[in-house]
Image (cartoon, helix red, strand yellow):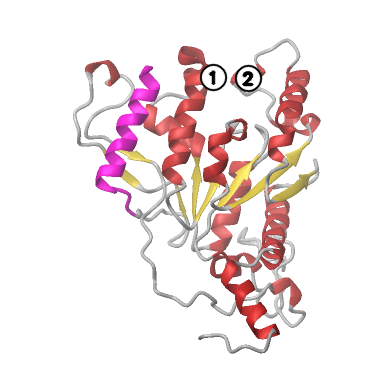
Amino acid sequence: MNTTAAAVAIFLSTLCATSAFSVVPTTSTTQHRRATGAFIITSPVPASLKSNLKSNSILYAGGFEWEDPAEEFDQGVDNPYKNPELNLLKDSSVNDEDGIGDGTGGEKGPSKIDPARLLGPRLNGSNLYFVGMMGSGKSAVGDVVARRMGSYNFLDTDEIIEKATSLSIPQIFETEGEQAFREVEAQILDSVHAYVRCVISTGGGIVTRMQNWSKLQTGIVVWLDVSPEVIIKRIEGTDRPLLQTEDPLQTLNDLLEARKSKYEQADIKIEVTADMDENKVADEVIKSVHYFIDDNPPAWKKAKAKAQSEGLDWVQ
C-alpha cells in the first residue's frame, strides 16, 4: 500500500473503531457546519507515515453521528413551490445592506420563507451529493445549500483527503499518481456516506469508479453541468493536476466526453451558465430537489397512497 493510502487507512480504521466524530461549532453560524467533525488519532503511526500524518493530531473530517429523533416518517412538509400562499425567497442573490441574501434587497415587508429550510424535513436525513467536472462549483454551491438548509453539514471530499493526508491534491498526484488518489477518494466516500444530513461535494472523477456509485446512490445525486469553456475561465491560474497539458481546454473536453455518461446517471441535472453565481445555482438546486422528492416519494408513501386509493384504512 502506498504512503497516502496507508495514512488514510489508519485514519478510517480508527474512525470506525471509535466513532470519534463530534459536532464542533463554527464562527459563521450555529446551525451550519463545514467539515467540522473533529477526529482525534490516538493510535501509533508508522515512522514512514509521520511526514504525512502526525499522531495525536486533530483532523477535521466532517460529518457527525446522527441520533434518530424518533419523529414520524411524514413531517407534513410539502413542496413549497406548489403553495401559492407562501411568500417564498426566489432569488437569494439579492442582498440586503448586511450582505444577507433574502431576496428583498433590504426592502421592508413580510419576511420571505427560504425553501431550503423546508428541504431537511422532506429529505429525512438523506444526503445530497454534488458531482461534476472540476471548476463546476460543487464546493461553493454545496456550501451555500447547506448554509441555507441550516440543519445539514457541508463536507468536501477533496478537503477531507488533504486534511487526512497532510498533502495537497496536486502533491498526491505528483508523488503517487492518479490511481493512488482515486483509491484514497473511494475510501473517504466509503466513510462519509455512512453519515446522514450532509451536503457532500465530490471530486470530478469520483463517478468513474462503479463502486463509488453504490455509495452515491444512497442519497440524491446532483450534477452541475458546466461547459468546458466556462470552466476554463473559472480555473485559470490554478494548478489542476489533470490540466497540466499543452491544451487544457481540449483536455477538459476529452475528460467531459469520457465522464458524461457517468454524470448523466445523477438524479438531478443543473445546467449552469456563465452568468449564474453560486447563489443562483443553489436556488435551482433547491427547487429541483423539492420537485425530485415529489416525483420519487418513499416506498411507504406510495403504499399509503395505494391503500387509500383502494379504500383501505392506512395504519397510523
What is the number of the mark on residue 242? 2
Q: Which mark is residue 178?
A: 1
Contact between labelled residues 1 and 2, with CB atoms less than 8 Å apart: yes
Q: Amino acid at mark 1?
A: Glu
Kindly report the distance in space between the C-alpha atoms of the residues bearing marks 2 and 1. Answer: 9 Å
The quarter in which the N terminus is drawn is top left
Q: Along the horizontal axis of the image, is 223 left or right of 272?
A: left
- The region drawn magenta spans 1-22
Determine if residue 16 is in view: yes
Q: Looking at the picture, tell me which residue is in the foreground, 30 or 36.
A: 36
Instruction: Examine the image and state in which quarter residue 5 appears.
Output: top left
Residue 261, percent across and down? Answer: 73, 35
- Is residue 253 found inside the magenta-colored segment of the image? no
Tag 2: amino acid: Leu
Q: Position of residue 20 (x, y in %)?
A: 28, 48
Q: Is residue 133 above or below residue 105?
A: above
